[in-house]
């Protein structure tokens, strides 16, 4: 006898049919080894399931470490390139200052590459955290009570891998961690190169004349440099309030107290930037009500294909008198059309009500303040 998921209950027993042997006397029921799950001819016991989870965990840790090493490699490229460019620029008065702005552009390219790699690292880190928080950690605190949906979330990220953080959050985090220092050093070095070599400047006009690059006036070069650097510093600090990254060790609340004002301002600016760009999805999320007769099938489809958690509430249609299942689903704005298509593929008689929310706080959405 098995349940709907094919899981054999732990205390299930089957009687022996061979009767007593020799002088052993009658024997009681024999305990059947606990089955984690079975499907067709595949049967996995709990020990085998645990071994498989351990190997999966080790594999994900190895993969995360590989991408973490790639992050360090990109940072090393940026540091070595900056050091080489500065050594060349200051090695002789006749060496052009244009090497420093070109190096800054190259370092920005390394930053974009590192942000992309960081998103992959966060994907593997998310799987590791799921196993650590909902498989290993509950073993240490009896009774064993993992989250009910952790296995579904882990299976979903294995079947349908999706980045867990936005590109902008990844870019901002890597910029604040490493690259803002390089940008400051390169900018200061460029000013010093123009101001000191081949001879110290005495007037602002002389500085602008030296800053010129070929036919491009010095005023244009300085303006482009300010805009270029301001863009990266704005992205780096306006994304400080985004906390979807699972691989980060965030500071404790009391350690952040001196920075509350900066964080509040950056959070407000992030909301304004999100409204204008539409690239960050953790604000202005939506709550959908799906009223259907196929609640179980609909909920499983939303879990698998949209990766959103579902809460079911039983209801009754007062017009028809029939029982209905009301599904509550918190979704991102760009998942609205996907949800509607999914619902009507399963149940063309379903009702869908989608309301904007002030905030959705929890895993995958906005972090608690």
Image (spheres, rainbow, N blue to C red):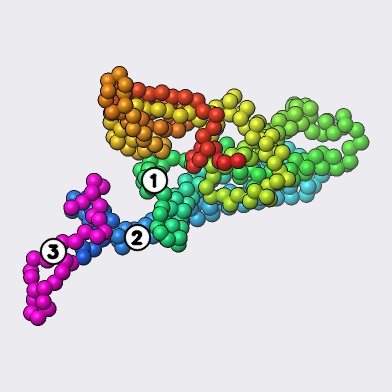
| Residue 85 percent coordinates (x, y) | 70, 46
Q: Is residue 291 magenta?
A: no
Q: Could you tell me which quadrant the C terminus lies in? A: top right
> Secondary structure beneath disc 2?
helix
Q: Is residue 133 above or below residue 305?
A: below
Q: Residue at x 46, y 58 (%)?
A: 137
Say which quarter of the image contains residue 221: top right
The numbered disc on residue 50 is 2
Task: Please name the predominant secondary structure of the magenta segment in the image.
Answer: loop
Res 314 → quadrant: top left
Label 2: how many residues lie within 10 Å, few (<14), some (14-19) or many (20+)?
some
Label of residue 15 in the image = 3
Q: Say which element carries label 3.
A: loop
Q: CA distance from mark 2 to mark 3?
A: 28 Å
Tally the marks.
Answer: 3
The residues colored magenta run 1-30
| Whole-percent x, y for residue 260 in the image | 70, 41
Which residue corresponds to the image point at 77% horizontal and 44% vertical from the top-left?
Answer: 189
Q: Is residue 361 above or below residue 92?
A: above
Q: Indicate the position of residue 367 as horizontal and vertical percent values.
A: 56, 41
- Alpha carbon separation for disc pair 2 and 1: 18 Å
Which residue is the site of mark 1? 149
Q: Earlier in the sequence, mark 3 or mark 1?
A: 3
Graded by Cα atoms within 10 Å as few (under 14), some (14 to 19) or many (20 or more), the crowding at tag 3 reads few
Q: Is residue 26 left or right of residue 81?
A: left
Distance from Cα at disc 3 to Cα at disc 1 = 35 Å
Residue 240 shows in this picture: yes
The residue shown at (89%, 37%) is 201
Crowd around label 1: few <14 · some 14–19 · many ≥20 (10 Å) = few
Q: Is residue 111 visible?
A: no
């Amino acid at each position: 006898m098995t349940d709907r998921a094919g899981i054999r209950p732990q205390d299930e027993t089957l009687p022996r049919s061979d009767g007593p042997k020799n002088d052993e006397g009658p024997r009681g029921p024999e305990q059947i080894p606990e089955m984690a799950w079975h499907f067709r001819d595949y049967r996995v016991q709990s020990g085998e399931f645990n071994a498989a989870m351990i190997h999966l965990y080790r594999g994900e840790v190895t993969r995360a470490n590989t991408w973490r090493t790639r992050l360090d490699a990109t940072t090393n490229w940026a540091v070595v390139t900056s050091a080489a460019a500065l050594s060349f620029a200051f090695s002789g008065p006749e060496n052009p200052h244009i090497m420093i702005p070109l190096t800054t552009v190259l370092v920005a390219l390394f930053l974009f590459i590192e942000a992309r790699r960081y998103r992959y690292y966060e994907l593997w880190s998310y799987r590791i955290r799921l196993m650590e928080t909902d498989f290993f950690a509950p073993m240490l605190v009896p009774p064993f009570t993992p989250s009910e949906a952790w296995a579904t979330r882990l299976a979903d990220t294995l079947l349908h891998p999706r980045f867990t953080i936005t590109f902008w959050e990844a870019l901002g985090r890597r910029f604040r961690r490493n690259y803002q220092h390089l940008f400051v050093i390169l900018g200061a070095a460029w000013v010093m190169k123009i101001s000191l070599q081949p001879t110290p400047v005495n007037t602002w006009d002389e500085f602008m004349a030296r800053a010129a690059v070929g036919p491009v006036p010095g005023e244009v070069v300085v303006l482009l440099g300010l805009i270029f650097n301001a863009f990266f510093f704005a992205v780096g600090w306006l994304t400080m309030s985004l906390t979807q990254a699972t691989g980060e060790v965030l500071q404790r609340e009391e350690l952040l107290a001196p920075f509350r004002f900066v964080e509040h301002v950056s959070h407000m600016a992030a909301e304004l930037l999100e409204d204008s760009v539409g690239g960050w999805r953790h604000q202005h999320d939506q709550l959908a009500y799906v009223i259907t007769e196929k609640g179980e099938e609909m909920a499983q489809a939303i879990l698998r294909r949209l990766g959103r958690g579902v809460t079911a509430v039983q209801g009754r249609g007062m017009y028809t008198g029939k029982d209905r299942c009301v599904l509550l689903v918190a979704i991102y704005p760009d998942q609205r059309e996907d949800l509607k298509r999914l619902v009507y593929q399963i149940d063309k008689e379903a009702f869908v009500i989608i309301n904007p929310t002030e905030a959705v706080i929890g895993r995958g959405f906005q972090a608690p303040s």
